[in-house]
Amino acid sequence: MSSNAVPPVSRLVDALESPAETLRLIAQCRDALHREGKSWADFFADYSRRKIEDGSYRGLLWWGPGDEAVALVSWEVAGDLGKRAGVFLAEGYQRRSVLEAFLIRLQSSMSEGAPFISWSDDVPGVSLEDRDSVFGGRGFYPVTRADMRFPKEAVLPTGAPEPSHSPRALTAADEPLIADLLYRVYEEDPVERALFATTANQREDARRAAHGLLHGEVGRWIPEASFGIVDDGRLVGHTLGNDLWGGLISEVGVDPAFRRRGFARRLLPLTIAGLRAAGFEVPRLVVTMRNTRAVQLYESVGFEFVPGGAGRLWLNLPVLGVTPSPA
């Protein structure tokens, strides 16, 4: 077979019907991610293995010659919108032609089902240029996100005081206020919202997101590391802390009408201190790189990028009903 040949593939098989083959491809992917310096490779493999063991793994194997799988797609369901997926190619099949053929095969086989609304860009063994060509050529929109951490030795910054808007601790009773702020924050950037959307109704999506943050869908919520600023009964800024494989600043949001007043800079030290007090010495967060104002803020506060912690997603914006706004 030539290096550019697409393998003769006969069928798609539920990944749980052949767990040994699924685990084989996952292990190959983990090793390839390690070679590419991805910091989350072991987490990916352990998370996938646990889901296979408890029967909750969602995916399909593409069966090839030699009675073995040549590709795997796995996904998480995004409410009633569709699937957020990732693709892994077996060793010997990590080529642009195979990736493109696999996506076409999946699209044709699932034409009547829930669509793929996003793809992970991490396809080990396939070059960046080839991924750009395949995903970009099929109309998907790239968004890069990166992990940042506040180093253990870093000194907490001091936010500028503003007596008329003093931060306060958030409680579970603030869930409706948090949902309303999430709506206003993400209304301004539909691409950012599309990363986590589960419904076409933005108000309902904000309500679900707030509930999930406080009730275990993003790890354990830590109230003592969650703070907000209220103006005339409305929450106009907040930072939330969660325990998701360590201390995570899960939300940093300021009402567009109250930006450039230092609210996020005042709230972040409180949440960092709260996470440290809860036993998480190195709090982290995830930032969308197109949000340059957020990147500059976090770096000025003292956060640093985690080596190997960046990754791209390809969004199906037409299906999501989104038109990109300027970064």
Image (tube, helix red, strand yellow):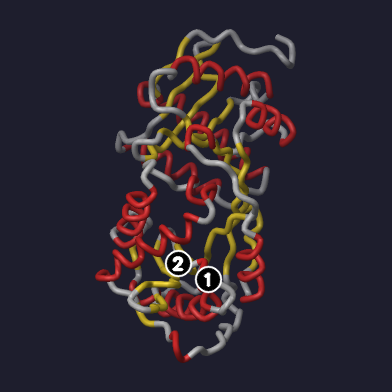
Are discs 2 and 1 less than 8 Å apart at CB? Answer: yes
User: Viewed as shown, does residue 298 lie left or right of 273?
Assistant: right
- Separation (CA) of disc 2 from disc 1: 7 Å
Q: Where is residue 48 in the image (x, y as percent from the top left)?
A: 43, 39
Inspect the image, locate mark 1, and give the three-letter code of the amino acid beneath it: Val
On the image, the x and y values in percent for residue 56 come to 32, 36
Which residue is painted at 48% across and 37% down in the image?
A: 321
| Quadrant housing the C terminus | bottom right
Helix, strand or loop under label 2:
strand
Within-10-Å neighbours for mark 1: few <14, some 14–19, many 20+: some
Q: Relative to 161, is 276 above or below?
A: above
In the image, farthest residue toward the left: 173
Residue at (67%, 44%) from the top-left corner?
Answer: 36
Sequence order check, earlier mark of 2 and 1: 2
Q: In this view, does 20 lie above or below 242?
A: above
The residue labelled by disc 1 is 282
**Res 158 label:** none
Q: Classify 248 as above or below 300.
A: above
Residue 6 coordinates in the image, percent (x, y)? 64, 13
Please tell me which residue is depicted at 52% across the width and 56% down the height of the picture: 188
Amino acid found under the numbered disc labelled 2: Gly
Task: Compare residues 322 and 279 and report the one nearer the observer.
Answer: 322
**CA neighbours of label 2 inside 10 A, class few (<14), some (14 to 19), many (20+):** many
Give coordinates of residue 24: x percent, y percent: 50, 29
- Element marked by disc 1: loop
- Residue under numbered circle 2: 247
Q: Quadrant of residue 229?
A: bottom left
